[in-house]
Image (cartoon, rainbow, N blue to C red):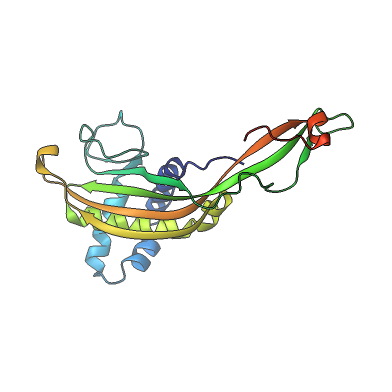
């Protein structure tokens, strides 16, 4: 039950997955970048292994790749991956329908309430803005994110995120907003999100059918 925070989930998951790749990058790089030469693949492996993938903005060295649930921030060094919510709209409503079975609360012989699961489907899109000093970094990082997302479909499903579609697009950063040359690519995630909660009804009202405590 709950309202999934996909931006927080993805930022933590990307850090976790990049750190897994650092431990043994050979297979995934050969598999993901099989159209590149051995020398180019070795360059990607060296890049990944010398970087620290973190959401700790207190670290400000050349070793960090900052990944956080936010828009990119030009007060923070590059490279950055910022995951943000584009929009979330109610798609298929079932406000007045039970989603699952009602259960007594507390569990036992003398419950005082009934817990009724409720919810609705939302149509949402999130985006991961990748901003780097070089185009090669943008390409490498975006392809890793693309792969990580599709490999995490089962975990996304478990938190109520379904029908995931991924798209990529290069974007241009206005030079007045960034003091140095920067390259950017957006990885967009369109999905359906199950927003659910528990409606707690006193036993005496539930028994009479007077259950119209909104929502």
The image quadrant that residue 212 belongs to is top right
Q: In the image, residue 80 lies at what x, y percent?
A: 27, 43
Q: Is residue 58 left or right of residue 189?
A: left
Residue 45 visible, this orientation: no
Q: Residue at x 56, y 49 (%)?
A: 93
Q: Is residue 145 left or right of residue 108?
A: left
Q: Is residue 179 left or right of residue 167?
A: left
Residue lying at the far bottom of the rendered structure: 35
Which quadrant is the N terminus positioned in? top right
Q: In the image, residue 143 lies at what x, y percent?
A: 32, 59
The image quadrant that residue 61 belongs to is top left
Count of labels in the image: 0
Q: Choose between 91 and 187: the one closer to the eye.
A: 91
Q: In the image, residue 188 lies at what x, y percent?
A: 35, 54
Q: Is residue 204 left or right of residue 97?
A: right
Q: In the image, residue 141 lies at what x, y percent?
A: 30, 54
Residue 136 visible, this orientation: yes
Q: Residue at x 20, y 35 (%)?
A: 74
Which quadrant is the C terminus positioned in? top right
Q: Residue at x 23, y 53 (%)?
A: 137
Residue lying at the far right of the rendered structure: 109
Vertical placement of residue 163 versus 133, above or below:
below
Q: Choose between 129 and 165: the one closer to the eye.
A: 165
Q: Residue at x 90, y 32 (%)?
A: 109
The image quadrant that residue 114 belongs to is top right
């Amino acid at each position: 039950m709950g309202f999934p925070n996909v931006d927080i989930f993805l930022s933590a998951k990307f850090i976790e997955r990049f750190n897994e790749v650092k431990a043994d990058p050979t297979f995934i790089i050969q598999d993901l970048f099989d159209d590149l030469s051995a020398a180019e693949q070795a360059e990607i492996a060296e890049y990944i292994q010398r970087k620290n993938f973190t959401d700790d903005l207190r670290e400000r060295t050349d070793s960090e790749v900052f990944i956080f649930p936010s828009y990119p921030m030009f007060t923070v060094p590059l490279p950055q991956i910022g995951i943000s919510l584009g929009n979330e709209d109610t798609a298929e409503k079932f406000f007045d329908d039970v989603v699952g079975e009602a259960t007594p609360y507390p569990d036992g012989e003398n419950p005082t309430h009934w817990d009724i699961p409720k919810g609705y489907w939302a149509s949402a899109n999130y985006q991961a803005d990748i901003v780097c000093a070089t185009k090669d970094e943008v390409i490498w990082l975006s392809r890793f994110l693309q792969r990580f997302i599709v490999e995490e479909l089962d975990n996304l499903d478990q938190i109520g995120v379904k029908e995931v579609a991924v798209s990529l697009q290069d974007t241009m950063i206005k030079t007045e907003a960034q003091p140095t040359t920067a390259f950017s690519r957006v990885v967009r995630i369109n999905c359906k999100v199950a927003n659910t909660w528990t409606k707690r009804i006193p036993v005496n009202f539930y028994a009479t059918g007077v259950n119209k405590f909104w929502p």
